Image (cartoon, helix red, strand yellow):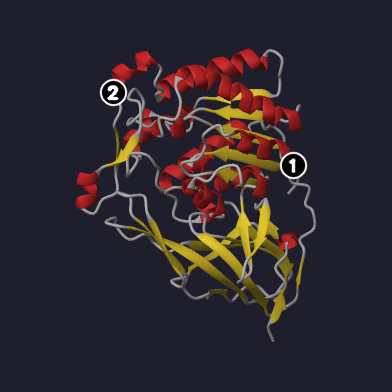
Amino acid sequence: MMHTTPLTAALIRGALELERTAHGLLPHRLTARARAQCADPQLALAESQPAGVRLVFRTRATTVELDTLPTKRVYTGAPPRPDGVYDLVVDGRPAGSASLAAGNTLTIDLGTGSARHRPGPVGTVRFAGLPDSAKDVEIWLPHNEVTELVALRTDAPVERVPDRGRRVWLHHGSSISHGSDAATPTTTWPALAASLGGVELVNLGLGGSALLDPFTARVLRDTPADLISVKLGINLVNTDLMRLRAFGPAVHGFLDTVREGHPDTPLLVVSPVLCPLHEDTPGPTAMDLAALGEGRLRYRATGDPAERAAGKLTLEVVRQELARIVSERAADDPALHHLDGRELYGEADFAELPLPDGLHPDTAGHRRIGERFAALAFAPDGPFAGRSPA
């Protein structure tokens, strides 16, 4: 006999809000107030993709079924994207993965920026053969696929997992923090680092949208957390959003806002990982149309290194400014820390594990970054020192 359990906030972690839809619940990673302050379609898509969002419950069930309505992305002229992956974790250990072919379709024309939505059917992911014993079960939703939650069924009752006393790590960053191009939601670098550090992850990595927006800073300010990190820079370069004159004050304002809600919380500012495309060449970033014509997805920098003199940002400029700003602020803020992103992924790593599309690491690159971050941040003398109870 299968039991149907109502889907409520008590069973969902990593989402800041749940929107009631015609089908069920849509997890959001920004609040409605924040979403109302920016009409950018890229941001709307990124924040509604449930990176780090998972169902968490305790049960003796040997079979678990989850009905969802995903939205698949199709890019005109680009290679087909794989279906999103649902990762099953039992008592903290990987226990299987599944995907759905069903769902809505969002077709995006990269040349014109237009998008066309086609509705599709609800599907079911099913995990069977689980141990017949009381256990903590997590289902991590696809990090790169909008997913409406429709129904949860199990062959034994479900109850809420008790508080284990684990610290909450709130992280904000760009598409790499979001999870591009990791294969599964538990192999994104923040998910890996959270597992190694023994903390609860709230991932506010927003693909293409880590742009020092004031509304994002206010969301960080207002979200309960024991540890906070912000990984800044690459999106500001590849959107060519601001010049050096605006960058420094914007970083200060962003950090000031976060500190309004978390005055003493360990706060780690992380600069960009190595990306040869933009180390010394400003943005904006553009799709490599020649590669696209060959069925490959790659990017190129369209700026001119000489434009740095006019204040255009490069990754090297961003790193220097972030190091300077954090150093100055840390004199009055001992809980503020800085990490050069090249310590997570640098020249030697690029030689061994190059960025397949020129911007994003693959699954092996994510593992390298996640392991490095955990080793540095959660070290006994690191900014996030102290391990949560098991």
The residue at 65%/60% (across/down) is 19
Circle number at residue 224: 1
Splitting the image into 4 quarters, where does residue 134 fall?
bottom right
The residue at 65%/53% (across/down) is 15
Mark 1 element type:
loop
Q: Is residue 67 above or below residue 371?
A: below
Question: Residue beneath label 2, please?
Answer: 304
Mark 2 element type:
loop
Residue 372: x %, y % from top left: 52, 36
Residue 34: x %, y % from top left: 63, 43
Gap between marks 2 and 1 measured at Cα? 42 Å
Residue type, mark 2 in image: Asp
Camera-side residue of 150 and 60: 150
Camera-side residue of 136 and 211: 211
Residue type, mark 1 in image: Pro
Residue 313: x %, y % from top left: 41, 23
